[in-house]
Amino acid sequence: MSSAIFSLLERQNEQPWRDSPLLVINPLDDSLADIDNTEAWSFHAGIASQWQAKGRGVYCQATAPDMNQYTQVMLVVAKEKALNHYILEQLSALPKGATLWLVGEKRSGVQSLAKKLPESFSKPRKTASGNHCQLFSAAHINDAGDPPPLTDYATHVHYELNGHSESFTTLPGVFSQTHIDPATLLLLNTLSEKPLGHVLDFACGAGVITSALRQSAEQLTACDVNPMAIAASTMTFAQQGIEVDLRLADGLPDNLEVFDTIVSNPPFHTGQNTDYAIARKFLSSARKHLNKSGTLYIVANRFLPWAEVIEEGFGHCDVLADDGRYRVYKAACR
């Protein structure tokens, strides 16, 4: 929860969301975990762990929990519009009379989203505003229904790689949902036909890199912090018929073996905010997860300071490709 959002909620004299079991959807931290009878539906493994540490129930998964058990839900508006709409449609399973609280910073599009609630909700009412944040409430006016299954939201994306067609399956809230990211494509073209051995794809998203490298790798491992990404990768790998050790984790998973190759298009945002800590921590610890002749490959925006961070860990950093916007970096263990 951003401090601004939390301050807005705390300033309210009446806080009806405390009166009955509350499900917080897409919490940005564990601020609301101190409220009694509160659970979370989280799309971030690290935040889910924070809720668990406070003894709260948390669902870190792509599919919705049993909504029929809640009469109060609070959606913290996500950066990704498609994810917000997916969540709202899943809330058709709420019992009649349940209250939806919609909260977010103005820049998140909370007001616009409030105007586009599904027909199963009453007209939203603005309950509070301040600190560049807004809070809306609406009642679920229909009986509990059956929302569309996750597979209905899958998008199949096709792209060209080295003269042949590739594809992946993605879902709301997963990076680059409608097309292949140009940085990822630059990385894949650079790695074409290199023998890679046992590969780890860090921050795998929809499994694009893992899938594309399947012919060059002897064994594949992939990880991501987002359960929607894990679900999308699962669909991608099933589509390609490949076997991957896929893990949900905040950063590098625990008990990782060593690899011949680590590849990544590492993220530098958490929600709306720029966040260099994720990639910096990954790059600082990558070497210890490579074997004695292992190699790290990453692609990143040219303005990001990753070359210096890689040099700190490996003693060197080579630029393999530069298209004016993105660079592909390589560092080999010596």
Image (tube, rainbow, N blue to C red):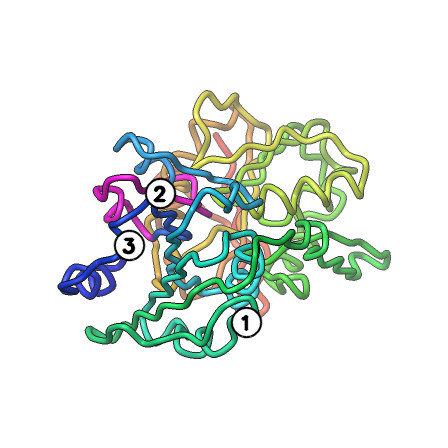
Q: Residue at x 69, y 27 (%)?
A: 219
Residue depth check, mark 2 versus mark 1: number of the one nearer the observer: 2
Q: Mark 1 points at which residue?
A: 324
Which is nearer the eye, 245 or 32?
Answer: 32
Q: Callout 3: 10 Å neighbours few (<14), some, many (20+)? A: many
Secondary structure type for disc 3: helix
- Give the magenta part as a residue range: 28-46
Which is nearer the eye, 238 or 34?
Answer: 34
Secondary structure type for disc 1: loop
- Alpha carbons under labels 2 and 3: distance apart: 21 Å
- Alpha carbons under labels 2 and 1: distance apart: 35 Å
Instruction: List x then y, in percent, for residue 98.
Output: 43, 56
Give the amino acid type for the residue marked by disc 3 in the picture: Trp
Secondary structure type for disc 2: helix
Q: Residue 18 carries which label?
A: none
Residue depth check, mark 3 versus mark 1: number of the one nearer the observer: 3
Which is nearer the eye, 253 or 38?
Answer: 38
Q: Name the residue under label 2.
A: 47
Q: Which residue is drawn at 46% across and 38% down?
A: 59
Give the amino acid type for the residue marked by disc 1 in the picture: Gly
Q: Which residue is drawn at 42% across and 46% down?
A: 70
Q: Which of marks 3 and 1 is nearer the N terminus?
A: 3
Q: In the rendered view, would you say 324 is above or below 89?
A: below
Q: Is residue 238 left or right of residue 330?
A: right
Q: Earlier in the sequence, mark 2 or mark 3?
A: 3
Q: Does the magenta stretch include residue 133?
A: no
Q: Which mark is residue 17?
A: 3
Q: Which of marks 2 and 1 is nearer the N terminus?
A: 2
Q: In the rendered view, would you say 70 is above or below 76?
A: above
- Alpha carbons under labels 3 and 1: distance apart: 50 Å
Q: Which residue is drawn at 64% across and 59% down?
A: 186
